[in-house]
């Protein structure tokens, strides 16, 4: 994510459906082929992945567009290999056009039939190939398609989707009515951005990419809509000098922990220590000093002298456990005004975001990271959470733009947007869906800021550290029952591997 980053591979880039449709023909031409050759390559790719299912009997479901053409080529290859395959069309008598019609003729010439859908073909099948609807879908799924999709989703057979699970919006990931729940999705030319975030990530199952041999030309023609990031996206942190001291590695002030909610800011501050911040101080409610201090003497805790604490800090975090009462509001106003006036790096989370939403017309931030989940983003943008989830890229960008901040829109496929670029975290694990997980993320990001990373790098690296730690914790001990504090030692392991 840094300005010194290496050229990105096609596997790291995300595109809108329109970008792929607009430029794939020119990219194919640059490589001496046409769109039908790409269709044949797509069918061959699907056939190769189909072989991993070890299926004797296959059902291929086709619609009327180019996605159907991929399906017909796949079916022909399966038949030529000597396996049983049925092709069921939603509208068997409808005349296809262009390359899809050519692929259908080749299937029929090979002795194949185009038959009307019946549930008995699902019962007979070992695997289902989904070639119903492609990326051109721009309205609700029609009832005749929806009925088939419903039956597929209620069977126990594995489903291999071609390019995109039928019914999913390629740009947002939202189902447009009924949508196929795929076991695997193999997408072509470039990854469609809706497949890697929100519910689109769920519908896609295991996501695979085949660039059909035109990636170099395609990348030269179009700028990606976003980038996919993981731990390998970041270079190693600079080695620490032998004569460094605690002040060398950043001084982070964590503000929050109203009476009765001390645990949130405790998680944030300890996460910051484990991520390598040299010194961590907590400014909190007087009633929270003891519970924050107990068991972690390395954290400096105070309920007085906020001004001197702000002056001391190299970066600031505010929000976890802050509350929204008078003490919280007064504290919030003082911290925000100081950081804005002195251009001090700031992370706003949790109740800090709720207080920000109440004062949306007052503050335009700079040098700041905001970390909302969809509910908090909804309050920041005066929308509802369902609207945010239905168009995560749009609202991550609008939130960043409205508050002149780097926005971390948390959730499956967390999006980071700084108004200039957008990144999406590749790692996601439901083990992180537990109270306090976001407080840990905030501490990680704050610590990286304190150690001198840019806003974009601190946000992106912090998100992938947190997500990868969740993956490791779930792999070791299962998805259920993980405590946010379980991430501390894993985060420390990971960040030292990147040092």
Image: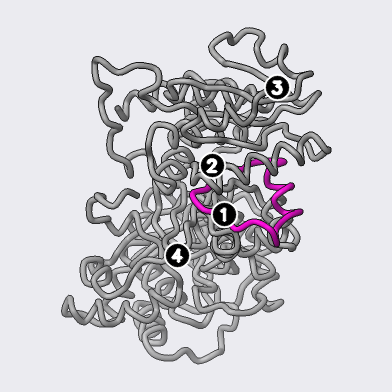
Q: Which residue is mark 3?
A: 303
Q: Is residue 365 above or below residue 323?
A: below
Q: Do labels 4 and 3 touch, CB within 8 Å?
A: no
- Classify residue 391 by image quadrant: bottom right
Q: Which mark is residue 240?
A: none
Determine if residue 365 is in view.
yes
Q: Which residue is mark 4?
A: 192
Kindly report the distance in space between the C-alpha atoms of the residues bearing marks 4 and 2.
33 Å
Label 2 or label 1, whichever comes before in sequence order: 2
Mark 3: secondary structure:
loop
Image side of residue 182 versus residue 376, left or right: left
Front position in the image: 112 or 290: 290
Kindly report the distance in space between the C-alpha atoms of the residues bearing marks 2 and 1.
9 Å
Q: Position of residue 431 (x, y in %)?
A: 60, 32
Q: Which residue is mark 1?
A: 365
Kindly report the distance in space between the C-alpha atoms of the residues bearing marks 1 and 3.
26 Å
Q: Position of residue 442 (x, y in %)?
A: 56, 35
Q: Comparing marks 4 and 3, which lies closer to the viewer?
A: 3
Q: Residue at x 47, y 89 (%)?
A: 96
Label 1 or label 3, whichever comes before in sequence order: 3
Q: Comparing marks 2 and 3, which lies closer to the viewer?
A: 3
Q: Do labels 2 and 1 touch, CB within 8 Å?
A: yes
Q: Residue at x 50, y 30 (%)?
A: 313
Kindly report the distance in space between the C-alpha atoms of the residues bearing marks 4 and 1.
32 Å
- Classify residue 379 by image quadrant: bottom right
């Amino acid at each position: 994510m840094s300005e010194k980053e290496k050229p990105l591979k096609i596997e790291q880039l995300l595109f809108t459906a329109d970008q792929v449709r607009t430029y794939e023909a020119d990219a194919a031409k640059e490589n001496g082929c046409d769109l039908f050759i790409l269709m044949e390559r797509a069918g061959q790719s699907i056939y190769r992945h189909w072989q991993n299912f070890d299926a004797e009997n296959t059902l291929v479901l086709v619609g009327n567009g180019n996605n159907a053409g991929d399906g017909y080529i796949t079916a022909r290859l399966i038949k030529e290999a000597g396996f049983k395959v049925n092709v069921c069309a939603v509208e068997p008598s409808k005349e296809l056009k262009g390359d899809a019609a050519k692929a259908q003729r080749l299937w029929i010439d090979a002795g194949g039939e185009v038959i009307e859908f019946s549930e008995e073909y699902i019962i007979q099948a070992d695997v289902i190939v989904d070639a119903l609807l492609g990326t051109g879908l721009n309205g609700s799924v029609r009832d005749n398609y929806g009925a088939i999709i419903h039956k597929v989703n209620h069977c126990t057979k594995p489903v291999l989707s071609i390019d995109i699970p039928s019914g999913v919006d390629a740009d947002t990931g939202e189902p447009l009515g009924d949508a196929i729940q795929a076991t695997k999705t193999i997408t072509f030319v470039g990854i469609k951005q809706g497949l890697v975030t929100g519910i689109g990530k769920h519908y896609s199952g295991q996501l695979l990419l085949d660039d059909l041999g035109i990636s170099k030309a395609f990348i030269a023609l179009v700028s990606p809509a976003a980038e996919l990031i993981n731990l390998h996206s970041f270079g190693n942190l600079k080695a620490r000098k032998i004569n460094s001291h605690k002040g060398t590695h950043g001084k982070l002030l964590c503000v929050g922990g109203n009476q009765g909610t001390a645990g949130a800011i405790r998680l944030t501050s300890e996460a910051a220590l484990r991520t390598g911040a040299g010194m961590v101080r907590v400014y909190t409610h007087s009633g929270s000093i003891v519970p924050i201090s107990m068991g972690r003497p390395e954290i400096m805790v105070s309920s007085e002298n906020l001004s001197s604490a702000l002056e001391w800090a190299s970066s600031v975090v505010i929000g976890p456990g802050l509350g929204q009462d008078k003490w919280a509001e007064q504290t919030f106003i003082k911290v925000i005004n100081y950081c804005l006036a002195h251009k001090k790096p700031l992370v706003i989370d949790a109740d800090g975001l709720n207080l920000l939403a109440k004062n949306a017309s007052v503050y335009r931030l700079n040098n700041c990271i905001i970390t909302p989940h969809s509910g908090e983003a909804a309050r920041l943008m005066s929308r509802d959470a369902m609207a945010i989830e239905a168009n995560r890229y749009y609202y991550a960008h609008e939130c960043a733009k409205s508050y002149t901040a780097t926005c971390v829109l948390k959730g499956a496929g967390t999006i980071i947007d700084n108004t200039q670029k957008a990144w999406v975290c590749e790692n996601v694990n439901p083990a992180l869906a537990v109270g306090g997980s976001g407080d840990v993320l905030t501490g990680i990001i704050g610590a990286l800021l304190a150690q001198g990373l840019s806003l974009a790098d601190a946000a992106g690296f912090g998100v992938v550290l947190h997500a990868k730690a969740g993956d490791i914790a779930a792999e070791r001990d299962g998805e259920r029952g993980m405590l946010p504090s379980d991430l501390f030692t894993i985060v420390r392991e990971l960040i030292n591997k990147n040092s």
